[in-house]
Amino acid sequence: MKNILKTLCLFLFTINISCKAQIIPLNSVDYPDGAYLKDLDNILPFWEGTWKGTVNNKEYTIQFVKFTQHQTTFSDGSFEYEDLLMGKFKVMDLSTNQILYNDLNTTIFNDYKIQLNGKLGTEYFFMFFDTQSNCNNTFKFSLVKDNTNPNQVLYTNFSFDEYDSWDCQYQNQEDIPMFLPQTNLTLTKQ
């Protein structure tokens, strides 16, 4: 009898927890506080791993990592859980074999600078968020899946977004050191 009672209590406890966190598709725009935006369509695994491409004599290596059920709390106290795709990268000058930028050793969530922000068809929209030392510079770019070659994507649509001009030591946003390409290139999954 005790085992049946324990099992029933555990069952009711499990139902109570699952009812509190509503699971909804990752790309939803309207959802309740505390919801879990889950990768129900299995979009993120395609991106996970290392992608490489070369343009203007520079080799770009981007690594994407999936963070499952990451909690974000907003200034008004509301929160959500979300499966997130975050990126880190390395840039090498092929003419000198010099590494120009490398944050591939990043393991802490807040140190990742690239984040998937949405998608439309085969185009996926990403944001880059720089550090305070680089005026919190941000920019956008897209990665477009190649339906003829599932191991390649097109890096495209680079555009500057916002930056903190108030305390910025740089005269113009274009002067802030930024190492991702501003031109199109093909990335190949490694």
Image (cartoon, rainbow, N blue to C red):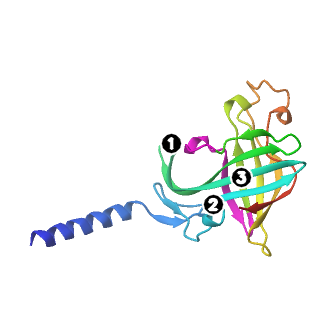
Circles 1 and 3 in contact, beta carbons < 8 Å: no
**Residue 118 magenta-highlighted:** yes
Left or right: 73 in relation to 119 = left
Image quadrant assignment for residue 131? top right
SS for dot 3: strand
Image quarter of the C terminus:
bottom right
Q: Nearer the viewer, residue 37 or 105?
A: 105
How many neighbours does mark 1 have within 10 angstroms: few (below 14), some (14-19), or many (20 or more)?
A: few
Q: Which mark is in front, 1 or 3?
A: 3
What residue is at 82 percent from the left and 34 percent from the top? 173
Left or right: 33 in relation to 29 = left
Q: Is residue 64 above or below residue 44?
A: above
Q: Nearer the viewer, residue 44 or 169?
A: 44
What residue is at 9 percent from the left and 73 percent from the top? 1
Q: How far across and how far down the image is residue 81, in percent?
A: 49, 55
Q: How far across and how far down the image is residue 57, in percent?
A: 89, 48
Stretch of the chain drawn in magenta: 105-123
Residue reaching furthest to the left: 1
Image quadrant assignment for residue 118? bottom right
Distance (Cα) linking label 3 and label 2 = 10 Å
Q: Amino acid at mark 2?
A: Glu
Distance (Cα) linking label 2 and label 1 = 32 Å
Circles 2 and 1 in contact, beta carbons < 8 Å: no
Q: Closer to the N terminus: mark 1 or mark 3?
A: 3
Which numbered circle lies on residue 48?
2
SS for dot 1: loop
How many neighbours does mark 2 have within 10 angstroms: few (below 14), some (14-19), or many (20 or more)?
A: some
**Residue 14 magenta-highlighted:** no
Q: Is residue 104 above or below residue 189?
A: above
**Residue behind mark 1:** 76
